[in-house]
Image: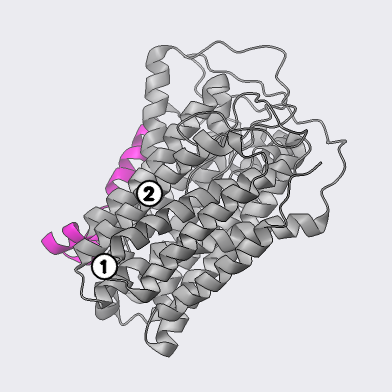
Amino acid sequence: MLCIACAQPARTTHRHAALPSASPAPCITSSKPTMSKTASPPLRNADHVALIAVIVLLGLNLRPVLASVGPVLDQIQAATGLGHTGAGMLTTLPVLAMGLGALAGSRLYAALGTVSGIRTGIVLIALACAARAWASDAVGLILTALAAGIGIACVQTLLPAFIRERFGDGASRAMGIYSTAIMGGAAVAAAATPWLAAHDNWPHALAWWGLPAAIAAAVWWRMLPARKGERAEGGHAEEHAQGERAGGHDDVQNDGRKGTNTNTSANARVAPAPTPATPSQAPAIPPTRSWLLMIFFGLGTAAYTLVLAWLPPFYTALGWTSAQSGLLLGGVTLMEVIAGLLVSALIGRFPDRRPALAAVLLALLLGLGGLLLAPVQLAIPACALLGLGIGGLFPLSLIVTLDHAPDPAQAGRLLGFVQGGGYLIASAMPLAAGAIRSALGQLDYAWMLMAGGTLVLLAMAMRLKPLK
């Protein structure tokens, strides 16, 4: 999924909603951003390029552990005896960890600090992937999925805050590059894993994704060694971490720059702890609206997790090869990127988000209909519509969330709740689809379930009218 970053003030159509900038990824800005009184010096060009490179390396490694499983799932099940419900756990557990990471973002920041937390996360991903070379039984795959999910949660919860600390006004562009790298990693893993399995075997094909993660960990360690006392600094930023919380495949950020003491000089290896934000004086968001937004995000993200986990097995059951189904999933991912770029470019024309939400939800519904009615004949257009629908729905649902936040502090808390709870909801969908396939012998009913959920989303979207 795409990341949404905030980096610069934008014009608003009303006091709550801010328009995204035309950056490589959708960008949401808070309506009343505050800046630190002292501006930090800009990064030198060489430092800037080096940091971008390591951020790209990190982003590329946040989705292969998820996207690599689906194209070879039939082989995994045949070799391990893993049932369909257990196979769903291979996607459910990492997404569950992502949700818990979003909910516990401030505690994670306080416990590990930014640099050490990111390093811990990418090392966990590398070890989890590499372990699949020998831990290739059902229990080993499930345990490595959980470990990798914890690693992903660490990186994607903490890295956006690091980007804003280091890049200042250039954070929006850096976040766009980061989110594109996430999608690129998913597309490459989906397309390449069947090829690797054909030339070796599926455990090694899954384990190979530990290599780029290990390279990313080594580069991060070399460029940003941990500073003594970094963990203690994290403890002073509890409120800041709530305002900077990140979620995900995905991940959304609100850059209010609440008194951040940014240090981006060439000699600063670890950014200093940000100054805590001033408590919000704005009226609290009604709990019923917060829950509506969280459920809306969760149901929408469930479509992503369902497609990621079960689209390739659906097509291999129809006679496609693993390589063909992997390429199809990679194509869906690329369409998600295109949809995110379209949202970024066009959302300013929709101060009322409901028409845009209706358009992407109809695309998703049509894509699911294609899978149900003529999955072979309509494979390409159906999957293109799925990608456009999923890729557009994710940023739009979070734009709507920020439309409801009256100030940056509440935006951070609301995003943490919406993304954390939403990922917990979405994590159930791959598991439910596996149970449906176990009970009924096919995935058509899972697509039907998601189509019903999309109709619910359409009804919910009509309630998300602009705030006055």
**Which residue extends farthest left?**
199
Q: Nearer the viewer, residue 105 or 423?
A: 423
Q: Nearer the viewer, residue 186 or 130?
A: 186
Query: First in sequence: mark 1 or mark 2?
Result: 1
Q: Is residue 335 left or right of residue 349?
A: left
Q: Quadrant of residue 179?
A: top left
In this rendering, the answer to whether 200 lies above or below 446 is above
Q: Is residue 178 left or right of residue 322?
A: right
Q: Amino acid at mark 1?
A: Val
- Residue 355 image position (x, y, % from top left): 61, 49
Q: Quadrant of residue 466?
A: top right
The residue under the point 58% across, 18% down is 263
Highlighted magenta segment, given as a residue range: 194-221
Residue marked by disc 2: 335
In this rendering, the answer to whether 348 lies above or below 205 is above
**Which residue extends farthest bottom?**
439
Give the class, few, some or many, for how many residues have Cα within 10 Å of label 2's Cα (few <14, many ≥20).
many
For residue 72, the mark is 1
- Residue 319 image position (x, y, % from top left): 20, 75
Type of colouring: one colour
What's the CA distance linking mark 1 and mark 2?
Answer: 22 Å
Asked whether residue 337 is drawn in magenta, I would say: no
Q: Quadrant of residue 184?
A: top left
Image depth: mark 1 or mark 2 in front: 2
- Kindly tell me whether residue 291 is visible in this rendering: yes
Asked whether residue 215 is drawn in magenta, I would say: yes
Give the class, few, some or many, for how many residues have Cα within 10 Å of label 1's Cα (few <14, many ≥20).
many
The residue under the point 66% across, 53% down is 418
Q: Nearer the viewer, residue 44 or 361?
A: 361
Q: Amino acid at mark 2?
A: Met
